[in-house]
Amino acid sequence: MRNPVYRRQWIFVLTSMVVAGMSAASGQTFPVLFAGKHPALAGETLPNSVVPALHGIVDAGRNADLHWPDFTSYKSEVAKLYESNGYSLLWIQSGRVRQQGLAVIEILQNADAKGLDPEDYDGSRWQARLLKLGQTPSEQDLVSFDTALTVSTMRYIRAVHCGRVSPKEFKFQLDMGGQQLPLADFIKTQVVNASDPAAEIQKLEPPFLGYRKLLALLPVYERYANQVEGERLPTVTKTVRPGQPYAGVVRLGRFLQTIGDIPAAVQLNPNASIYDGALVEGVKHYQDRHGESPTGNLDPRTINELNTPPQVRIRQIKLTLERWRWIPHSFPQPPVVVNLPEYRVRAMNPDGTVAFYKNVIIGKAYGHKSPIFEKEIQYVVFRPYWDVTPSIQRNEIVPHIQKDPNYIGKHNFEVVTPQGEVITDNQVSPEVLEGIKTLHLMVRQKPGETNSLGLVKIIFPNPENVYLHGTDAPELFSQDVRDFSHGCIRVEKPADLVAWVLRNNPGWDLERVKAAMNGEKNNLQVNLVTRIPVLIVYGSATVNEENQIRFFDDIYGYDAELDKALAAGYP
C-alpha cells in the first residue's frame, strides 16, 4: 500500500504539471475494439534529428533505463505502435506527460495490488523520471521515458491478462493465447486515449469469481502479516488436546483472532494457560482452511502450519493468481475444475459460482503426477474395464505375477490380445507372462465392485490417458493427503458428478445414473450431447464456497518452480 510520504510526492508531481486534455475512449470492449478505424493519437511529434534515437531504442529492443532493459520479445509490438503513430511520442505532449500516461504510471506503481512486483514495471523509478521531466529534459530524456512507459505498459497488460510466464515452460497443457494478444492495437485504441486507462486494462484480467475473491484477500492478508510477523508458537513433541495446558495459549489466541479464525468480538483471557473454548474452535477453523482434518488438537503438524510465516502465505496467493491468468477467459459450457493441491473437483455454474464439489484422490504416491491441462469431456462409461497402462503392466503387474502366477485371477484381472480376445483370467503360464512383458498381450481388470475404477469413468481424451473415475477403496477419502492414484483422479461419490455431466442428455438423471452404475450391463458408453470443458489446475491458495481463504501444501513442487521462473525476470 502507498505510504503518506509517497502520496504527498505524487500529488506534488500531479499539481506541478500541465496535463494535455484528451477525448474519452470509445467505450467498446476487447476484442471488438480492434474492428474499424483506429483513432488518431495526440503525442509529441519529434524533430527529424531525434527520430533516429527513438528508432534506435525500438529497433534494438533495449532501453538501458529500464529495470529489465531487454524487451526483445515485445519489440515487434512496440515498433507497430510507434509506426502507427508516425514515430511520434505516445505519452508526452508539449514536453509534458499526458493524463493517460500519469494514470498508467500509477497502475504500474501499484502492481502489487494485482500480486505482481512493481519493480518489474519500474515502480520505484517513475517518481524520479517525472521530476526530471518537470525540469528541463533533453529530447533524449523524452524518448527514453516514452519508450520505457510503453514497454512497461505492455509487460503489465500481458501479465494481468495471461501471466508473467507461459504454462508451457512447465509442460502444462494450458493455452491462454496470450502471445496473440494485440498489445499495440489495444494500447492505441483503449489506453492512450482513454478517460480511465485503469478500467480498460482491468477488463483484460481473468473474469472468474475465484480470481477476484483471491485478489481481494491479498491486501487483507498483507495487513495480517504486518500484525503477526515474527510471532512464533512454542513447538510440541506431544499432542496438546483440549483442556490441557499449553505455554503459547495467549499468543495462539491473538494470532487466530488477527487472521480471522476467531471472531473479533470474542473476548480472550489475557492470562489463560489452558487450551480450551474459543481457542479450540479457532484451531479447528484454521486446520480446515489448511487442508487438515479439523480435530482441534495441537499436534506438531498443526503447530508447524501455525508457525509458517505470513509472507509464505502471501506468496502462495500471488503464485495462484499467476496461474489463474493461464486459464482461458471464457468457455462454451461451464467447466469441471480439479484443483490438485486441494484434492477437490468442482462443477461450475454459468455465473461462475460452484454448483457442487467433491473430494478427489490424485496421483503422486506411485510416481505418477496428475497432469495439468484443459480438455473436453466427451463420454461416460458405466461399469468399465480398467485397461492397465503399459508402464503399470511392466512395473507392477509383471512382478506380482512372477511372485504368484495366480495373481490375475485373485484380483479380477484378465489377459487379452490387442483385439480384446481373452487369453486367461486365471493362472498365467510362462508363455503368457512373456507376452505380458513384451506388451504383445495386455492386462485389464473386469468390471464390477472390485474394479479399481469403481463403477463409472468420465472420459476426456488426452495423451496421458487420465480420466475421472470412481474407486473400489472409498475409505481413502478420509485421509488428509490423498495422492494414492497413478495419475488418474478418483472422485468421491461420483454419481452426482456423472449426473451433472449428463444433464443435457435427456433422461439421464441421478436415479438413472445410479441404476446404470449398479446394473448388469458392463462397459456401457454414453456420449455427451454437449461436450463439457474440464480443467486440471494447480493452486495452493483458494477461496472456498464460504469465502474463506484456504492454503495447501505444494505437493508437486510447482510453486517453487514458478517462484524461480518469476524471479528470473523478463526476457
Image: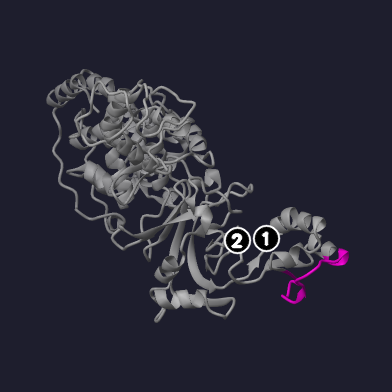
Determine whether label 2 and label 1 are within 8 Å by CB. Answer: yes
Other residues around mark 2 within 10 Å, as few (<14) / some (14–19) / many (≥20): few
Q: Nearer the viewer, residue 314 or 293?
A: 293
Q: Amino acid at mark 1?
A: Thr
Residue 465: numbered disc: 2
| Front tag of 2 and 1 | 1
Q: Residue at x 74, y 67 (%)?
A: 409
Q: Which residues are magenta?
A: 414-432
| Label 1 element class | loop
Relative to 358, residue 312 above or below: above
Residue 389: numbered disc: 1
Q: Nearer the viewer, residue 31 or 402?
A: 402
Residue 225 screen position, x and y as percent: 31, 27
Relative to 36, residue 268 above or below: above
Mark 2 vs 1, N-terminal side: 1
Q: Nearer the viewer, residue 334 or 262?
A: 262
The Cα–Cα distance between marks 2 and 1, rounded to whole angstroms, is 8 Å
Relative to 39, residue 450 above or below: below
Quarter of the image with the N terminus is top left
Residue 5 screen position, x and y as percent: 19, 19
